[in-house]
Image (spheres, helix red, strand yellow):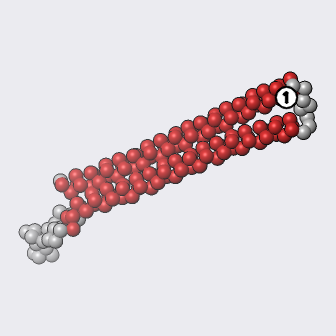
């Protein structure tokens, strides 16, 4: 009976490890999506703020009578566009790097769960073989069985 309990316990432990790994993977997928979404939202905010800053700068320059399509005002306009887009792309790249890191940790959790499951199964199987103790047997027939084959042939 103990042998069966050991095997069943090993299988149950293995299933538990695999489910835990799959749950960790799903949590990583969810977190990965949230990180990417947050990065996209942050980039949208940066770009919107840049449009507002660009519009305000153009309005201020126009109010002072400056020609907007040449010289320093044009340089200011292009600098605002360039720097804000660079900031937005950096936010997106950082978000992607963080999301990939989370993705890798989810994959690592699944791989670890397989090794842990194998360990549980092997641990349960060791109870089937007597746990590696000298003098123990496998199955139902032991060396001290009173059953004799002689005489039946």
The count of marks equals: 1
**Residue 35, quarter of the rendered image:** top right
Q: Is residue 55 visible?
A: no
Which residue is rendered at x = 66% and y = 45% of the image?
90
Q: Is residue 10 left or right of residue 98?
A: left
Toward the front, the furthest residue is: 64
Question: Against 74, is 62 above or below?
Answer: above
Which residue is rendered at x = 90% and y = 26% of the image?
65
Q: Is residue 149 left or right of residue 102?
A: left
Residue 124: % across, % down: 27, 57
Q: Is residue 103 left or right of residue 152?
A: right
Q: Is residue 53 left or right of residue 7?
A: right
Pointer 1 local density, CA inside 10 Å: few below 14, some 14–19, many at least 20 = some
Residue 58: % across, % down: 83, 29
Mark 1: which secondary structure? helix
Toward the top, the furthest residue is: 63
Q: Is residue 73 visible?
A: yes
In this rendered view, identify the residue nearer to me: 116 or 69.
69
Which residue is rendered at x = 60% and y = 44% of the image?
95
Residue assigned mark 1: 61
**Residue 77, quarter of the rendered image:** top right
Residue 112: % across, % down: 41, 55
* Quadrant occupied by the C terminus: bottom left
In this rendered view, identify the residue nearer to me: 152 or 49.
49
């Amino acid at each position: 009976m103990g042998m069966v309990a050991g095997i069943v316990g090993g299988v149950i432990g293995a299933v538990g490890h695999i489910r835990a790994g799959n749950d960790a993977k799903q949590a990583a997928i969810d977190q990965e999506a949230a990180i990417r979404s947050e990065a996209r939202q942050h980039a949208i905010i940066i770009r919107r703020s840049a449009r507002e800053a660009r519009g305000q700068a153009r309005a201020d320059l126009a109010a002072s009578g400056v020609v907007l399509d040449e010289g320093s005002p044009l340089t200011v306009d292009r600098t605002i566009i360039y720097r804000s887009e660079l900031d937005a792309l950096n936010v997106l790249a950082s978000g992607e790097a963080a999301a990939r890191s989370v993705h890798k940790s989810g994959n690592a959790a699944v791989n670890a769960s397989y090794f842990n499951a194998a360990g549980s199964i092997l641990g349960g199987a060791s109870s089937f073989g007597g746990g590696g103790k000298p003098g123990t047997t496998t199955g139902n027939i032991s060396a001290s069985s009173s059953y004799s084959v002689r005489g039946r042939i």
